[in-house]
Amino acid sequence: MLEPVRWMTDAGEILDAPPSSRPAPYGKLRLIDQTLLPLEERYVETDDPEEIYDYIKRLVVRGAPAIGCAAALGLAAVMCRSDAGSVGEFVEGVRSVASRLAESRPTAVNLFWALDRCVAVVDGADGVSLVEELKDVLIVEALTILSEDIAMCRAIGENGLPLLSDGATVLTHCNAGGLATSGFGTALAPIYAASERGVAVGVYSDETRPLLQGSRLTAWELKRAGIEVVAICDNMAAQVMREGKVDIVIVGADRIAANGDVANKIGTYGLAVLAKHHGVPFHVAAPVSTIDFSLPDGGGIPIELRDGDEVRRGFGRLTAPEGVDVYNPAFDVTPADLITSLITDRGIKSPPFVDSLSELRRDLVDGKAAKGC
């Protein structure tokens, strides 16, 4: 399994879950630098808030679940070095660093979900009177978010597995595999689950302009895992579908509105339209933490606009006139009526999504109430 987001203890141990003994060891956020793939596999460690902000902003770490885990672990790494003299001062420090990290990217809801959860657990730590104890609470919460993500992604794989038959071919967009999470992926999770059971599944991986996450990252990790993968340019997807080479489309999500509208990497909307035209099932895989129940529909999802040089210069070479205007939205919103199902860690949710997601929300609320949260 890939280890794109982990906790590196000061003793050099790599953790993916809270330790059995307390207190939890101090450490740093550890990331694989995805900007260097597929040419180089290099890891970075940091406890500096501006470096963490930069790593999220610059896509050293990317993918909604991975961003959430990185932000939580990054916040813990920064604050375990805090010299706050009181619990109140420490809590204010947590809020300040969380606020800064939340500014790094606007679309992926997991970023805000994870940071809010960390702030809440520190703010609500009743009976804790020592700063050192509060640091432990924060580190454990961040590691819990990490371990939950690993489990959620595996659950997505198990829930999506029945959609894949032996010999099926999946078309996917961008990277929603291990590199986008804490190790097993969302859109690629059913594919990995199938591979574990000896079910042969092939994959067409959209290149995903302008930063090529499909060809650089998805093709890299699938090839590394021994899974058959063919990289194609984004504008080849229609022809591949027309030739009958695609049985199912599975993509990830950065935010899902309460009605089932899905924000994902730019190009997903067009892929959904193509799938509809060719009668190919179009599925979205994501953990329930990606669902933003506060938004009634996708019209309220903020769309990140990125630097025009990502289009003008690609990976260094000028491929458009210097200074030409560029419109570079990082995401688009796919309407719910183009989506066959949502594959979540809480099962497959079917249309009408207003009803199935509303029921899911009630179950989540009831579950929290049963735990006394």
Image (cartoon, rainbow, N blue to C red):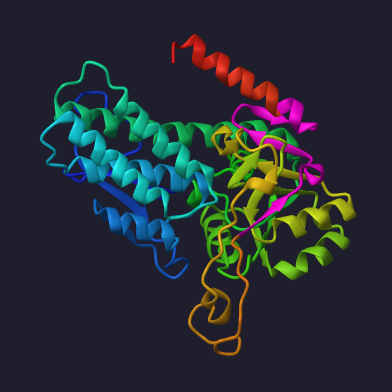
Is residue 220 depicted above or below 319 in this figure?
A: above
248 relative position to 24: left or right:
right
Given residues 296 and 349, the one toward you in this image is: 296
**Residue 235 in the image, given as x and y percentages of width and height:** 75, 70
Give the residue drawn at x 56%, y 54%: 226
Given residues 205 and 201, the one toward you in this image is: 205
Give the residue drawn at x 73%, y 50%: 334
Q: How many labels does the image show?
A: 0
49 relative position to 315: left or right:
left
Per the rendered image, the range of residues in magenta is 331-356
Image quarter (top left, top right, bottom left or bottom right) of the N terminus: top left
Is residue 93 depicted above or below 333 in this figure?
A: above
**Residue 337 in the image, given as x and y percentages of width and height:** 82, 43
Given residues 83 and 178, the one toward you in this image is: 83
Residue 346 shown in magenta: yes
Dividing the picture into quadrants, the one containing residue 174 is: bottom right
Residue 115 shown in magenta: no
310 relative position to 39: left or right:
right
Image quarter (top left, top right, bottom left or bottom right) of the C terminus: top left
**Residue 359 in the image, given as x and y percentages of width and height:** 69, 21
Is residue 87 depicted above or below 330 in this figure?
A: above
State the residue lying farthest toward the bottom: 321
295 relative position to 373: left or right:
right
**Residue 179 in the image, given as x and y percentages of width and height:** 48, 52
Give the residue drawn at x 14%, y 25%: 130
Tell me, yes or no, if residue 14 can be seen here: no
Tell me, yes or no, if residue 99 can be seen here: yes
Is residue 17 depicted above or below 224 in this figure?
A: above
Dividing the picture into quadrants, the one containing residue 210 is: bottom right
